[in-house]
Image: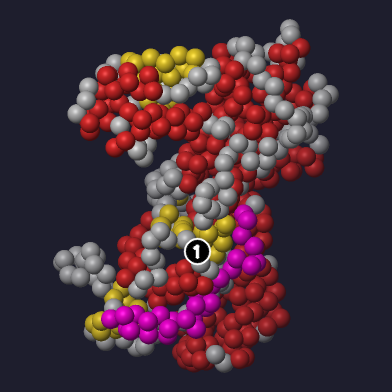
Amino acid sequence: MADPQLLLRQRFAEALERIDPSLAGADPVIRPSQHADFQVNSAMALGKRLGRNPRELADQLLAEVELAGIASQLEVAGPGFINVTLDDAYLAGCLADLRDPRRGVPAAEPAERVVIDYSAPNVAKEMHVGHLRSTVIGDALARTLGFLGNEIIRHNHLGDWGTPFGMLIEHLLDLGEQEAATELSVGDLNGFYKQARTKFDGDEAFADRARARVVALQAGDVETLRLWRLLVDQSELYFSSIYDRMGVTLTDTDYRGESAYNELLDGVVDELRAKGLLVTDDGAECVFPEGFVGREGEPLPLIVRKRDGGYGYAATDLAAIRFRMLDLDATWLLYVVGAPQSEHLEMVFAVARMAGWLEPPARAEHVAFGSVLGDDGKIFRTRSGETVKLADLIDEAIGRAAEVVATKSPHLDATEQAEVAEAVGVGAIKYADLSSDRVNDYVFDWDRMLSLQGNTAPYLQYAHARARSIFRKADLEPPTADQPVAVTITHAAERELTKQLVAFAGAVASVADGMRPHRLCTYLFDLAQTYTAFYEQCPVLRADDEAVRASRLDLCDLTAGVLAQGLDLLGIEAPERI
């Protein structure tokens, strides 16, 4: 077991069960400690539960727990805490799995089939900063949960249906298909949309044509569907170009828009009606899930079909859940959607449970997030007050990063500088988003996110490149994956670095506990800082002893590997040279 904390939890759990069978299944509380490597706090809480003195229970735990060859020192402290100091040889041995492709991270048991709904831009509209968090957080979770051994199904729930497409199709016809395709292909989706909206608002004849086109679209008119598909295809090409630039793992096969569920909507209503869940309220067909009330305390409805017979977002969302659970056999649904949609999604989940589509252990979870703010504390916008386009944000990030790289890394040639600038710029945007708790708003600050100091992507990328540069300086090839790790702890800084390295598995697992990518960011920052202290205190190539030199080279290689793997789980590149 690569993570000592996981092993300690297992051994203390076994000891608790031996002390009292009623404690079977108890999860010991074990945390890193300033006074030792770890502190076990279980005797405090369990002593009260059993009506026993916590310190006496702690003494009995020490007598029962089996940690020979694992702990070099165990002691009861205070009213019943247990301090654990690990044996140096055992600690170094925990590094053995860190060179394999999984870096010592155990695969999830049982593995789950996870559908992750994220990004979700609208057809014929450009992606903007409002899509940043869903895209970046969703992709980090897809990467991390997949690395943990789960089967990941990515769903990009495009806004590709509805009344706006009547005016968009008519505007396309006015321009001519070839001209419209050219305009859309260069990414000017916003301009195309604004032109259509202006005509719709100012030209009654055009508005009538647009309304008629919506009816034709919903009726399945073949020619209208062909024109609609042209709009969707051009938009998807644009979205894919943004994902490629951002290093996001969404592909063409992951697009599943609102239109994909159109044929399922009638069936959703029929099934809800057959199960006695539908209520007609003011002409609309609704479900009233328990526990949801309006401002005046009145029951709050989820409107499945409107009074005019049309369907809204709720029906589409219910159809999506039904499809994902019954057709895809998913066990876990994640919706990476902004916090304002919390009540809507909770109501949809509640109705899906009432309908029997979302039965335990299967579950759905809203991965909510806050907003991106400017330095004025308001939603991040351009100086002119416009929404910030994602393409422009990427351009500016790479441009600013290029200035930093040119100043800090003049030894790189022009091609290398451009590649590093792209990795640093895009990485800086992603890391600034991921490193704060997703539920909070954060302020977009170019200077901070591109700094080589502090908890930033450039700082981590620089730490990785520094660890790799040692091998180039020595004209050595880094160890291969099949070479055994041979670390011997001879210095306190080596010990601290080893402790950080073996905590990687726990850090990755902690992301899945609450969908919190910032926990992995915090771990990687701590690792980079610990490596910096090791680098400053422990000569590597100039070590007096050959065995110590080899051991420290191993620590450098393992640090670089873990930093690169951790950054990759966040969707961030780790250049070999900076």
Quarter of the image with the C terminus is top right
Percent position of residue 200, x then y: 48, 83
Percent position of residue 476, x then y: 82, 25
- What residue is disc 1 on? 330
Give the camera-side residue of 510 and 7: 7
Q: Per the image, is 250 magenta?
A: yes
Q: Quick check: 565 above or below 42?
A: below
Residue found at the far top of this picture: 544
Q: Per the image, is 204 magenta?
A: no
Q: Quick check: 100 above or below 179?
A: above
Q: Is residue 373 visible?
A: no
Q: Quick check: 229 above or below 107?
A: below
Residue shown at the point (35%, 23%) measured from the top left: 61
Give the camera-side residue of 388 and 113: 113
Badge 1 element = loop
Q: Quadrant of residue 74?
A: top left
Residue shown at the point (70%, 22%) measured from the top left: 486
Percent position of residue 68, x then y: 50, 19
Give the camera-side residue of 298 and 46: 46
Q: Is residue 287 visible?
A: yes
Quarter of the image with the N terminus is top right
First to last magenta residue range = 248-276
Residue shown at the point (32%, 77%) measured from the top left: 303
Percent position of residue 322, x then y: 44, 72
How many residues crowd around disc 1 within 10 Å: few (fewer than 14), some, or many (20 or more)?
many
Secondary structure mostly seen in the magenta stretch: helix
Amino acid marked by disc 1: Ala
